[in-house]
């Protein structure tokens, strides 16, 4: 019998391997992305101190009007712009992009491009 592959477990294993080499600091935090079925979340993390500097998601109240009647890919782009604006307010321009084991297409790519368009460098 063949065993069914759990894609989320494979993704988590990839993310664990990636995290051995990927780390964020106060000057250059890690831009972590989590993608659920309906929503997308992004946060800037300082791994040295162990805390989140700022976050944005498709569930934020301030993005509610902007995201209405948009596709998930367009919503991801707006979340990327929102996290970039928050980062720039904190004086952060460079980040380390952590795609959390997801393939760099679709919503993940859209979020990254939105953040780059708003001024983040990675």
Image (cartoon, rainbow, N blue to C red):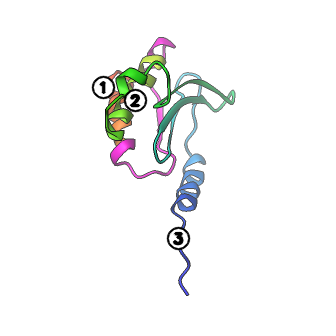
Q: Which residue is denoted by mark 1 in the rendering?
A: 117
Report the Cα–Cα distance between label 3 and label 2. 31 Å
Residue at 41 percent across and 29 percent down: it is 79
Q: Where is residue 74 in the image (x, y as percent from the top left)?
A: 31, 35
70 lies left or right of 14: left
Residue at 47 percent across and 29 percent down: it is 95
* Image quarter of residue 44: top right
In the foreground, 62 or 32: 62
Residue at 36 percent across and 28 percent down: it is 68
Whether label 2 touches label 1, CB < 8 Å = yes
Q: Which residue is denoted by mark 2 in the rendering?
A: 80
Check the image and name the residue furthest to the bottom. 1
Along the polypeptide, which appears first: circle 2 or circle 1? Answer: 2
Along the polypeptide, which appears first: circle 3 or circle 1? Answer: 3
Q: Is mark 3 on a helix, strand or loop?
A: loop
Query: Is residue 72 something one can see in this rendering?
Result: yes
Badge 3: residue crowd in 10 Å (few <14, some 14–19, many ≥20): few
The answer to whether 85 is drawn above or below residue 2 in the figure is above
Badge 2: residue crowd in 10 Å (few <14, some 14–19, many ≥20): many
Check the image and name the residue furthest to the front. 69
60 lies left or right of 115: right
Report the Cα–Cα distance between label 3 and label 1. 36 Å
In the foreground, 34 or 13: 34
* Image quarter of residue 78: top left
State the extent of the magenta-drawn residues as a range.
Answer: 88-108
114 lies left or right of 101: left
> What's the mark number on residue 85?
none
Q: What element carries label 2?
A: helix
Q: Which residue is denoted by mark 3 in the rendering?
A: 5
Q: Where is residue 100 in the image (x, y as percent from the top left)?
A: 51, 46
Q: Does the magenta stretch include residue 89?
A: yes
């Amino acid at each position: 019998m063949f065993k069914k592959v759990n894609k989320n477990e494979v993704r988590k294993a990839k993310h664990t391997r990636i995290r051995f080499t990927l780390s964020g600091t106060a000057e250059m935090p890690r831009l972590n992305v989590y993608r659920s079925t309906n929503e997308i979340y992004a946060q800037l993390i300082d791994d040295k101190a162990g805390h989140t500097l700022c976050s944005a998601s498709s569930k934020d109240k301030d993005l509610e009007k902007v995201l209405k009647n948009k596709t998930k890919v367009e919503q991801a782009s707006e979340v990327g712009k929102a996290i970039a604006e928050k980062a720039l307010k904190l004086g952060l321009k460079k980040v380390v992009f952590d795609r959390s084991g997801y393939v760099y297409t679709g919503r993940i790519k859209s979020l990254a491009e939105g953040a780059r368009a708003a001024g983040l460098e990675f």
